Image (tube, helix red, strand yellow):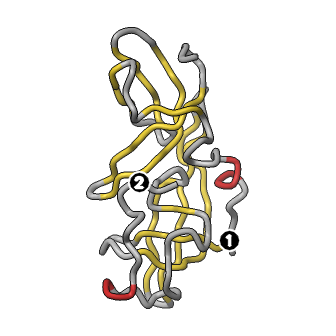
């Protein structure tokens, strides 16, 4: 049942990437207002297929809360390539009543690091999306069939 305060999975866009994220319902009516992890608010029709029970598509966010320096992840870099990556730092940026806003710095290769939100859909569990080694992203080597809606 959708009601204020209930956690849900919801489809989120980040640039060209579309995937499942988590959020908390703020209001329910003809339109449902949801605050996504990371602070973005979305409004969707009450019966939208882009809203699902919490954890049904994302597996929840508990694994993200455990990420620390040295954790392995699959990461979509700024060029749009998925690669195996390593968290090199984690810092809190902002806090709210709903969740902590934290940023990760991710090692893409020996020469390249990127920073992103801990709740970004560009971060996935290790071994779920990236099919190639750290820092060796090549479009021809990627299996991008699951890029549209990540689980």
The image's mark for residue 89 is: none
Q: Which residue sits at x=46%, y=47%?
A: 20
Q: Quadrant of residue 112?
A: bottom left
- Residue 9 in the image: x percent, y percent? 52, 37
Do the residues bearing badges 1 and 2 touch, measured as CB atoms within 8 Å? no
User: From the viewer's perspective, is 68 left or right of 151?
Assistant: right
User: From the viewer's perspective, is 25 left or right of 127?
Assistant: left
| Label 2: few (<14), some (14–19) or many (≥20) C-alpha neighbours in 10 Å | some
Q: Quadrant of residue 143?
A: bottom left
Residue tagged 2: 149
Q: Which residue sits at x=39%, y=72%?
A: 77
Give the mark nearest the N terminus, 1 or 2.
1
Residue tagged 1: 71
**Res 88 seen here:** no
Q: Is residue 140 above or below residue 84?
A: below
**Res 139 seen here:** yes
- Residue 116 in the image: x percent, y percent? 46, 59
Q: Which residue sits at x=48%, y=70%?
A: 75
Q: Secondary structure at mark 1?
A: loop
Q: Is residue 38 above or below residue 80?
A: above
Label 1 vs label 2: CA separation?
Answer: 24 Å
| Label 1: few (<14), some (14–19) or many (≥20) C-alpha neighbours in 10 Å | some
Classify the position of the N terminus by image quarter: top right
Q: Give the number of the mark in front: 1 or 2.
A: 2
């Amino acid at each position: 049942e959708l009601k204020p305060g209930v956690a849900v999975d919801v489809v989120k866009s980040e640039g060209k990437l579309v995937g499942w994220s988590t959020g908390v319902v703020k209001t329910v009516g003809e339109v449902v207002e949801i605050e996504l992890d990371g602070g973005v608010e979305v409004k969707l029709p009450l019966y939208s297929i882009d809203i699902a029970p919490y954890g049904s598509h994302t597996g929840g966010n508990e694994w993200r809360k455990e990420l620390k320096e040295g954790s392995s992840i699959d990461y979509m870099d700024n060029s749009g390539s998925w690669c195996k990556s390593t968290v090199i730092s984690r810092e809190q940026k902002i806090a709210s009543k709903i969740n902590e806003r934290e940023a990760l710095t991710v090692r893409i290769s020996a020469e390249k690091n990127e920073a992103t939100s801990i709740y970004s859909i560009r971060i996935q569990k290790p071994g779920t999306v990236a099919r190639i080694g750290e820092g060796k992203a090549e479009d021809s080597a990627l299996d991008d069939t699951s890029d549209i809606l990540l689980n």
